[in-house]
Each structure stands twice: as C-alpha cells, then as structure tokens.
C-alpha cells in the first residue's frame, strides 16, 4: 500500500517539476523540511506541534508516554535487516535460520519491519517502521521536558500530511526492493497464465449500453 502512495506522490511531484522524493536513510542528518501542521486536536483542545527546519531525530525518553529508545536502535535494526536480506535468511528466537524464499520471504520481512506478534524475532530486528515514525513525532520534545504531545507522524490519521512521511517510506520501501533484487526473474509461465484465455471485454457505465462512456 505504501509503495503505491509513494508512486502517486512522485507523480504529483514530477507534474510540478520537482524531483522524486529523496529517501531518509541517514538517521543522523538534519531534516531539511520543516512542518507546521496548523491543526487542532479534539483531545485536550491542543494544537499539533510543529517541526522546525533542520531538526535531527534524537534518542527518545518520554516517561509519561512509556516510550524510550535510541537512534542507535533504529540503525542496528536497519543494518540487521540488510544483512539478513543479503544472507538470504533471518534468525528466529531459537537462533535457527529462516530462509527468505521467493514465496514467503516478502511476508517474513513485512512482519519484521512492521513488527507484530508474527515477527520472527523482534529482539533482533526490532520495530523499524513504527519507531521511525515515533522518532519523527517526538523530535521537537524527545525527553518530554516541555510536556508537548507527539507530532503528526505519531498518528495514522495525520502522518501523511508531513513531507517526512514520504521520505521515510521511500526508505522503508527500498528495503523490500533490496530483497526483491535477490530473487530470480519471473518465468514465462508465471507471467503468461497458460490455459487462461480472455473471451470478452466490456466497459459498463450506469444507464448506458455496453462500451459507451
């Protein structure tokens, strides 16, 4: 789903003479794009906080939100994912090798990156996608000293308003592309659907005869 969102976003950028979105894969570099949501939250009648230009994401320790992690965690999870992709296998909780096969590998990676109860090994591979969102959402007040709420990247209802959403997902999608690049090419049989024949095609518009728009 996110890949299609990025595709649409890139088309919109190119239609406005802008380059494709640049992935955010260096977690230490400043975020050039600031974002001022100018949105109100119905919870507590508070405004969504802004992110100023050239802010960097930092270690998060917000006791009130029971949220604590370091940028090194994100880097470690990223590197382990790439290492496993290039090795063709991930490690499960028992230390066994689980191959990233042509049919199952993409699902295994998805459960690692978007970590859930189905993750092969959350201790090793963490929760890169979601904690990345939280790093951006907390970069204006990472330790909670100013009692600011999390930013728009911390809520699925508002995250897509922030330009960094698209840079982050360009990076996340690249991880899957890295895996796909290790797979063999599709065979003619996989692409031609032998035995399947198109007998008829019609375009139907409500209130009109077939094939009339």
Image (tube, helix red, strand yellow):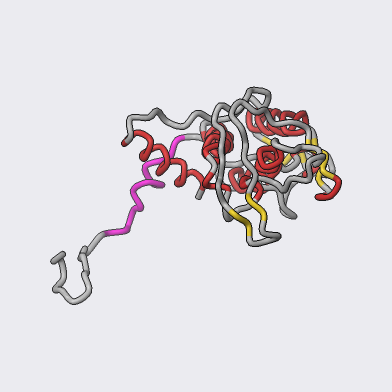
Q: Is residue 46 above or below residue 89?
A: below
- Magenta run includes residue 40: no
| Residue 70 placement, left or right of 78 | right
Residue at 68% from the left image edge and 23% from the top image edge: 28
Picture quadrant where residue 30 is located: top right
**Would you say residue 108 is visible in this rendering?**
no
Q: Is residue 182 above or below residue 116?
A: above
Nearer to the camera, 206 or 38: 38
Please report the bounds of the magenta region as a residue range: 185-197
Q: Position of residue 13 (x, y in %)?
A: 38, 35
| Residue 208 placement, left or right of 23 | left
Q: Position of residue 96 (x, y in %)?
A: 79, 40
- Magenta run includes residue 192: yes
Residue at 36% from the left image edge and 39% from the top image edge: 11
Residue at 22% from the left image edge and 74% from the top image edge: 206
**Would you say residue 172 is visible in this rendering?**
yes
Q: Position of residue 164 (x, y in %)?
A: 56, 37
Q: Position of residue 40 (x, y in %)?
A: 60, 55
Label the magenta part by its dominant secondary structure. Answer: loop
Residue at 27% from the left image edge and 59% from the top image edge: 197
Q: Quadrant of the C terminus?
A: bottom left
């Amino acid at each position: 789903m996110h890949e299609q969102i990025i595709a649409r976003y890139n088309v919109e950028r190119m239609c406005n003479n802008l380059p494709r979105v640049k992935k955010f894969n260096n977690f230490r570099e400043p975020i050039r794009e600031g974002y001022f949501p100018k949105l109100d939250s119905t919870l507590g009648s508070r405004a969504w906080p802004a992110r100023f230009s050239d802010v960097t994401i930092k270690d998060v320790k917000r006791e009130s939100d029971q949220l604590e992690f370091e940028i090194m965690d994100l880097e470690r999870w990223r590197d382990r994912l790439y290492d496993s992709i290039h090795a063709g296998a991930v490690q499960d909780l028992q230390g066994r090798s689980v191959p990233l096969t042509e049919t199952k590998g993409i699902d295994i990676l998805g459960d690692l990156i978007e970590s859930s109860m189905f993750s092969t090994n959350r201790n090793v591979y963490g929760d890169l996608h979601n904690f990345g969102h939280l790093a951006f959402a907390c970069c204006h007040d990472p330790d909670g000293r100013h009692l600011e709420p999390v930013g728009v990247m911390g809520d699925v209802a508002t995250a897509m308003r922030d330009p960094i959403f698209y840079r982050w997902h360009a990076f996340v999608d690249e991880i899957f592309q890295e895996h796909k690049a290790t797979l063999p090419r599709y065979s003619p049989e996989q692409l031609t659907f032998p035995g399947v024949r198109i007998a008829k095609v019609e375009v139907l518009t409500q209130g009109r005869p077939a094939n009339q728009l």
